Image: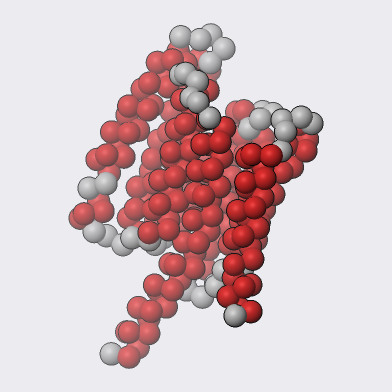
Amino acid sequence: MMYFGRNLLLPLLVLITSILYIFFIPEEPFEIKLLFKLIPMALIILYALLRKRTGRRSAHALLLAGLFFCMLGDGLLPIWFVYGLLAFLIGHLFYLTAFLNQWRFSWIRLLSVIPIGIYAWIMGGKLAQHMAMSADLKGLVIPVIAYVTVISLMLWSAVMTGNVWASIGSLLFVISDSILAWNKFVEAIPYAGVLIMATYYAAQFLIACSIGAAVHRRSSLLKVNIKY
């Protein structure tokens, strides 16, 4: 029972601090708002750090690096958008590399590249079209298109791992960033702030959970191979 309680403590803290930030922390003062924005991510990183480390350690380290750069992006995005975007881009590259290290080929999963590719084409084209009409946003077209491309590849690589947590987490990340980009560059979305952060925190937590899930699967396969 005590072990079960310890396992639930950090996830519960992540949930509480996420709800606190999304629904109760006022916009001002900005510094306090930013601090509470980062607390759930810090807890998620701690949770990922404490996950079982047997199996392929490189994937664990890459996912931790991805979580860290995403938290860095959280802090930078409201102040310096381009630097925040760059931090998130680096984070996704770490995620992408981690998922490629856990690649498990399947023709069915491979076909997911089609809807993901269609999403990237439509979303990237729509964002580029709207940004190109604004003199202030023209310079962001290439970075944003690069970001859409990388996050789409990240989602596909997550699906190819066969890891449910990684796949759902990455899908939620794409949904979160799509709402953010559409709300910022195309048109306002009702309750955008709540939708963005709720899907974002859920995405990061599930990606952190994928560490243990991947390890458990590998350990089980190893035991089967040894037995037989």
Nearer-the-camera pick, 132 or 3: 3
Q: Position of residue 50 (x, y in %)?
A: 61, 68
Please report the residue visible at 55 percent of the width from the left and 73 percent of the height from the top.
52
Q: Check the picture and name the quadrant holding the C terminus.
A: bottom left
Residue 221 against residue 118 in the figure, above or below: below
Visible in this render: residue 166? yes
Q: Check the picture and name the quadrant holding the N terminus.
A: bottom right
Q: Is residue 23 left or right of residue 106?
A: right
Quarter of the image where one finds residue 226: bottom left
Please report the residue visible at 71 percent of the width from the left and 38 percent of the height from the top.
25
Visible in this render: residue 59? no
Q: Position of residue 92 (x, y in %)?
A: 50, 45
Please report the residue visible at 35 percent of the width from the left and 47 percent of the height from the top.
156
Q: How is the image coloured?
A: secondary structure
Q: How many marks?
A: 0
Residue 183 against residue 155 in the figure, above or below: above
Quarter of the image where one finds residue 215: bottom left
Nearer-the-camera pick, 113 or 20: 20
Q: Position of residue 175 (x, y in %)?
A: 43, 38
Q: Position of residue 138 (x, y in %)?
A: 50, 15
Please report the residue visible at 53 percent of the width from the left and 8 percent of the height from the top.
135
Residue 86 against residue 137 in the figure, above or below: below
In the image, farthest residue toward the left:
107
